[in-house]
Amino acid sequence: MPREYLKKATLTAQSHASEVHETVKTILEEIEAGGDDKALEYAKKFDRYEGSVLLSPEEIEAACALVPEKLKADIRFAHDNVRRFAETQKATLSDVELEIVPGFVAGQKAIPVDAAGCYVPGGRYSHIASAIMTVTTAKVAGCRHITACSPPRPGVGVAPAIVYAAHICGADKILAMGGVQGVATMTYGLFGLPKANILVGPGNQFVAEAKRILFGRVGIDMIAGPTDSLVLADGASDPFVVATDLVSQAEHGYNSPVWLVTDDRAVAEKVMELVPTLIDDLPEVNRDNAFAAWRDYAEVILCGDREEMAACSDDYAPEHLTVQAEDLDWWLGRLTCYGSLFLGEETTVSYGDKATGTNHVLPTSGAASYTGGLSVHKYMKIVTWQRATREGSKSVAEATARISRLEGMEGHARAADVRLAKYFPDEQFDLSADG
């Protein structure tokens, strides 16, 4: 059967994507030209904060002292899980070498970038988990300098729990600055910071646009849009749990899409009945976001069978993908496009967002069709090298000269010719393009 939309989105994540470009471009250009002073000017305007830009050891210690011991324990628990998972990921990368032909060896090395800039949102919500996810993975990767950047609150500064998390996870500097000005400061190396080689971490549309504009000048984890989540549920699923999970992700923001894909009409209708009630029960600050996201961006899609459900999910390539259905091994083997996969009712996106160890900085807006999320690998440069004996280079030089001439690249060919003439003066080689 064709997919039936029981609820269809009226807006998409790209509906307002172009509105901030010129604003962000102007701010970046002005800060690059004006340096520290211009960055401070924008910080005063947007952050409404005039305290220390780079936190001193004493200020870090004072902020850490404000964090309750139970929360510290939870942060350490999450940090340990993220660290161990990142270490396991790093172990999958190894330096290798291969003898291409006798006497000619090529190899691969994995080298961490030197300086990482980790953006940690701190506006509507204090994203403690983002500090853990971004700083920990950079530390495990081996980056020599890590800056954690987070928006300060007027008269308060960076949230103490974010300071504590960034500190114990290994940040070398903590920058009290938000938005475009914070991203620009890390990129341009203001206030004595090293210029970042890579910018990572979630942020609002202005932060995302700044990273997009700067990409190429620096590396980035990904071009991120609003967070999105999809739930695959069959007739064996619990509609209340499904609805709760959808609402939990809709609270991220007014434009955060959530999607339900099911082959059971009764489950779909029950979830649609439950969601508004669950949203109404949220605190007001969460309720408004979830209500708008459900009203404007959510979809409920009815499919004929599980294969059609899987195909639908792959088409959406969601950031977060939850399976609440029977035969989880089948789904694990079948699904191919997602940022992170949550198999079974016993786990949930919220676990991955906060504490299980897998990273929550993930591809959005369908990008999971071609890339994964933040990991140790994002901070690593996979580079190659080669070394040869004179005899080992002979066959490679001959092939290089002929291919180069066929392509019309005579300079390349002569780089091979000169070696053959030097190393094997008594031998004759046919190095013409048609040889």
Image: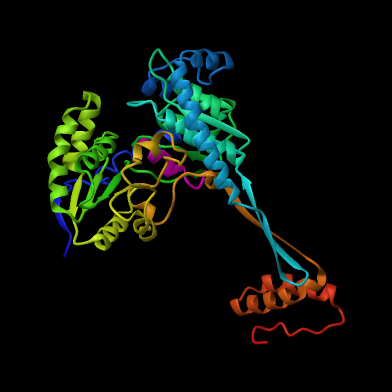
> Which residue is rendered at x = 38% and y = 40% of the image?
209
Q: How is the image coloured?
A: rainbow
Q: Is residue 320 left or right of residue 8?
A: right
Q: Is residue 33 visible?
A: no
Residue 47 is drawn in which quadrant? top left
Measured as percent of width and height from the top left, residue 161 is found at: 45, 21
Q: Is residue 66 left or right of residue 322?
A: right
Q: Quadrant of the N terminus?
A: bottom left
* Number of on-image labels: 0
Asked whether residue 210 is drawn in magenta, I would say: yes
Secondary structure, magenta segment, majority class: helix
Q: Which residues are magenta?
A: 206-218
Measured as percent of width and height from the top left, residue 7 is found at: 14, 48
Q: Quadrant of the C terminus?
A: bottom right
Q: Is residue 179 above or below residue 347?
A: above
Measured as percent of width and height from the top left, residue 5 is found at: 15, 54
Residue lying at the far bottom in this picture: please name it.
Answer: 435
Residue 74 is drawn in which quadrant? top left
Asked whether residue 229 is drawn in magenta, I would say: no
Residue 333 is drawn in which quadrant? bottom left
> Which residue is rendered at x = 49% and y = 29% of the image?
77
Q: Is residue 232 left or right of residue 131?
A: left
Measured as percent of width and height from the top left, residue 279 is found at: 19, 32
Task: Identify which residue, 346 or 104, lies in the foreground.
Answer: 346
Q: Is residue 312 visible?
A: yes
